[in-house]
Image: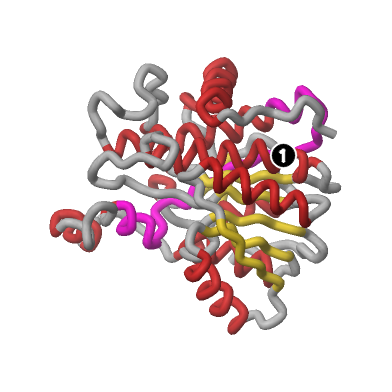
Amino acid sequence: MYDVPDQSGKLVVVTGANSGTGKEATKRLAAAGARVVMAVRTPAKGETARAEILAEHPDAQLEVRRVDLADLESVREFAEKLAADEPHVDLLVNNAGVMTPPTRHTTKDGFELQFGSNFLGPFALTVQLLPLVLAAPSPRITTMASGAANFGRIHFDDLQWERRYRRTAAYSQSKLADLMMSNHLARLSADRGWGLLATAAHPGYTRTNLQTAGASLGRERPSLLNRLLFSANPLPSQGVELGTEPLLVAATSPDARTGAYYGPSGRFGLTGPTKLTNAPKNALNPEDNARLWSVAESLTGVSLPTRTK
């Protein structure tokens, strides 16, 4: 198991911290000494997760704060309140996401739910917290992508899937967009001398509620077909402890490199110990990454501050 280096004195923000990889990352970062802001959509669920972590690690420093990545006003309020309370953030972990809802849903701002929640919300949060992160001695931002990014393509002519919604393709696009955001952030840091370590990770096939929660949107529970496919899936899978390790390595390893991408080393990249992995070709074109960043600025109304550091 990956041993998280000492995080004493560091302030970390983890989105989606109440369950799955977010909760596991929160627990292990806090156990290593970090003070963790658990950024969650539903505070009651965050408080439950906080209590569970404290039962295992009584000295953990945890604070629950609300942010809804499907609501840009909520993102703005979260960033403003955090900036008012803290001098800097050492590490931002963009972990929260939604996966393959069966029908097309939209965010509060009218974006297709997966593109909005998985990419545009984290983008807005990242940009608005950037001055706070860059004020840290060794700033880091880590973003959770997915192996699905390998099959993704950015549909610049229909980013919101208004013509024909395909849930798996929409998910793949949103996670490819996350990886492109991280890569462009790394390039911006290099070009502007920020000293920011921007990394990304994917969890392989990790068993969490992500697979079932998305499939339940708009329904009381996933369809019978979804439940059968999930229970009978022949692909190798792993528990959340191992599945969170690529994210933790990307976020905390002293050997991590900016622009790097981490994932499982086992068969098909689905399970196993963490390794440095290759990003899909579609995430490596600087012009496309810059174009997507510009589109995201336009859609969210959020852009880089004129002065950073």
Q: Magenta includes 115? A: no
Q: In this view, does 96 lie to the left or right of 152?
A: right
Stretch of the chain drawn in magenta: 187-214
Residue 220 sits in quarter: bottom left
Residue type (three-letter) at the residue carrying disc 1: Leu
Q: Is residue 291 left or right of residue 260?
A: left
Residue 10 percent coordinates (x, y): 78, 59
Q: Tell me the quarter of the image containing the C terminus.
A: top right
Q: Residue at x 43, y 55 (%)?
A: 271
- 171 or 275, which lies in front? 171
Q: Is residue 60 left or right of residue 165?
A: right
Q: Tell me the quarter of the image containing the N terminus.
A: bottom right
In the rendered view, tell whether residue 183 sits above or below residue 254.
above
In the picture of the structure, the residue carrying the numbered disc 1 is 130
In the rendered view, tell whether residue 163 sits above or below residue 15.
above
Query: From where the camera sits, is residue 276 visible?
Result: no
Residue 187 percent coordinates (x, y): 69, 26
